[in-house]
Image: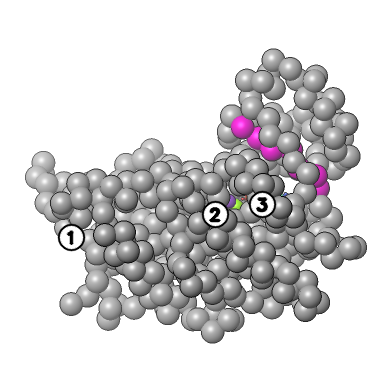
């Protein structure tokens, strides 16, 4: 019999649309001989719906073909509850694959529900997801462990609003322009700006606070962007490294999804010593954040000095067929459908170990 895999997509997130594209790709690459796919969409408002259309037709209009449903937190059921004509039916589920990016999906919230449900799920657990989503906590934890990273400052909205001048002065004394300003919980570069002077800094802070009540100011690193795909639970597999060459001044939302001209270079051309250093750091960081299943770990490599800096961990990285994570795995000997097999297997193994 086939394993029933529920694929979650959409979500109450600024990355809703990106998630649909990732999930479509995941569903197209799941081996239909092995799996029965149960596509579950979450609208921008947070409504859970069972998608009944064809996978190849999945796009932003997906809600037209759907039935009300949700995953039950009831561990004795391990099921999806489908509601049709005021009647509830339970559909058993073997594993859940959350292909949700950003808040309310990649941040530990959905993982919490899935923990309650007792259903195995792909990827990192609650704490790990939350820590990797929150760039302020991620950086503080990395700092404790001596992971190399650029200088940063965390600012809360209420404090900023009552002491604006203090913070601007402090930033200008601790950093030199340009600086990066970002919401603590963000992805796809939403709300992130590079500020070159005081006026831009004030605007950038205002912009970042539109998305979160906590923001980061970061030293801008004049760097190449190097990414590493990691797979595994206790046994960890690290892929070859990839480089992103953004089409814009930095790897902004536009550079990621609109221009279509940012380049992915696999493998990244690096000195052996730098490559080894990054791979070692990737394993250290994966363990530090107690990641499981998968994560894409992103670094900066200073263009002049080759110094390596940790940037962030993405626990549900982009999963389109041209995305870095599946591409790196493919290059490293694990084609997309096999990668999905492996992730599902890791989810089941992790769940069994808990019992
Ligand atoms: P997201 O989770 O949205 O991808 P990142 O922290 O990775 O957020 O920032 C998005 C992009 O902004 C990076 O890929 C890079 O191009 C640029 N960037 C972010 N922080 C820095 C920094 N400190 N120095 C240089 N570039 C940065
Ligand atoms: Mg990210
Ligand atoms: Mg990033
Ligand atoms: K992240």
Q: Earlier in the sequence, mark 3 or mark 1?
A: 1
The residue lying toward the viewer, choosing from 178 and 342, is 342
Q: x, y (%) of residue 61?
A: 38, 52
Q: Position of residue 323 (x, y in %)?
A: 57, 67
Residue 227's place in the image compared with 252, above or below, is below
Q: Is residue 183 above or below residue 308?
A: above
Q: Which residues lie in the magenta part?
A: 214-220
Disc 3 from disc 1: Cα separation: 42 Å
Number of marks present in the image shown: 3
Instruction: Residue 284: name its quadrant.
Output: bottom right
Q: Please determine whether, in this image, residue 232 is positioned above or below residue 180.
A: below
Residue shown at 86% from the left, 31% from the top? 172
Q: Which element type, helix, strand or loop, lies under badge 1?
A: strand
Identify the image quadrant of residue 339. Answer: bottom left
Q: Is residue 185 left or right of residue 252?
A: left
Q: Which mark is residue 289?
A: 2
Image quadrant holding the C terminus, namely: bottom left
**Label for residue 145?**
3
Mark nearer the N terminus (2 vs 1): 1
Q: Is mark 3 within 8 Å of ligand 4?
A: no
Q: Between marks 2 and 1, how big is the CA–CA gap?
A: 31 Å
Residue appearing at x 61%, y 59% in the figure: 285
Query: Could you give the CA–CA distance between mark 2 and mark 3, rounded to whole angstroms?
Result: 11 Å
Main secondary structure of the magenta stretch: strand
Which mark sits nearer the N-terminus, 2 or 3?
3
Residue that carries the numbered disc 1 in the rendered image: 92
> Can the viewer see residue 285?
yes
């Amino acid at each position: 019999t086939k394993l029933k895999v529920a694929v979650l997509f959409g979500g109450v997130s600024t990355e809703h649309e990106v998630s649909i594209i990732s999930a479509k790709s995941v569903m197209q690459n799941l081996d239909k001989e092995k799996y029965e796919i149960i596509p579950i969409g979450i609208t921008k408002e947070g409504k859970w719906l069972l998608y009944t259309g064809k996978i190849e037709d999945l796009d932003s209009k997906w809600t037209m073909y759907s039935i009300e449903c949700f995953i039950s937190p009831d561990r004795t059921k391990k099921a999806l509850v489908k509601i049709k004509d005021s009647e509830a039916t339970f559909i058993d589920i073997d594993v859940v694959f959350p292909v949700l990016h950003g808040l309310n999906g990649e941040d530990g919230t959905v993982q919490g529900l899935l923990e309650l449900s007792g259903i195995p799920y792909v990827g990192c657990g609650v704490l790990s997801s939350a820590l990797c989503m929150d760039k302020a906590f991620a950086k503080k934890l990395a700092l404790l462990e001596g992971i190399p990273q650029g200088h940063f400052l965390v600012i809360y909205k209420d404090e900023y609003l009552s002491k604006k001048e203090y913070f601007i002065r402090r930033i200008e004394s601790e950093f030199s322009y340009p600086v990066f300003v970002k919401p603590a919980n963000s992805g796809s570069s939403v709300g992130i700006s590079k500020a070159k002077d005081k006026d831009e800094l004030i605007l950038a802070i205002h912009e970042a606070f539109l998305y979160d009540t906590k923001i980061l100011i970061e030293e801008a690193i004049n760097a190449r962007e190097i990414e590493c795909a990691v797979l595994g639970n206790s046994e960890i597999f690290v892929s070859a490294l990839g480089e992103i060459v953004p089409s814009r001044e930095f790897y902004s939302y536009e550079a990621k999804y609109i221009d279509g001209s940012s380049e992915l270079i696999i493998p990244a051309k690096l000195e052996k010593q730098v490559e080894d250093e990054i791979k070692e750091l990737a394993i250290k960081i994966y363990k530090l954040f107690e990641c499981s299943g998968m994560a894409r770990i992103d670094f900066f490599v200073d263009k002049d000095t080759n110094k390596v800096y940790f940037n962030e961990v993405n626990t549900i990285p982009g999963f389109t067929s041209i995305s870095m994570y599946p591409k790196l795995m493919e290059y490293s000997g694990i084609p997309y459908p096999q990668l999905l097999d492996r992730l599902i297997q890791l989810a089941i193994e992790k769940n069994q170990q808990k019992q």
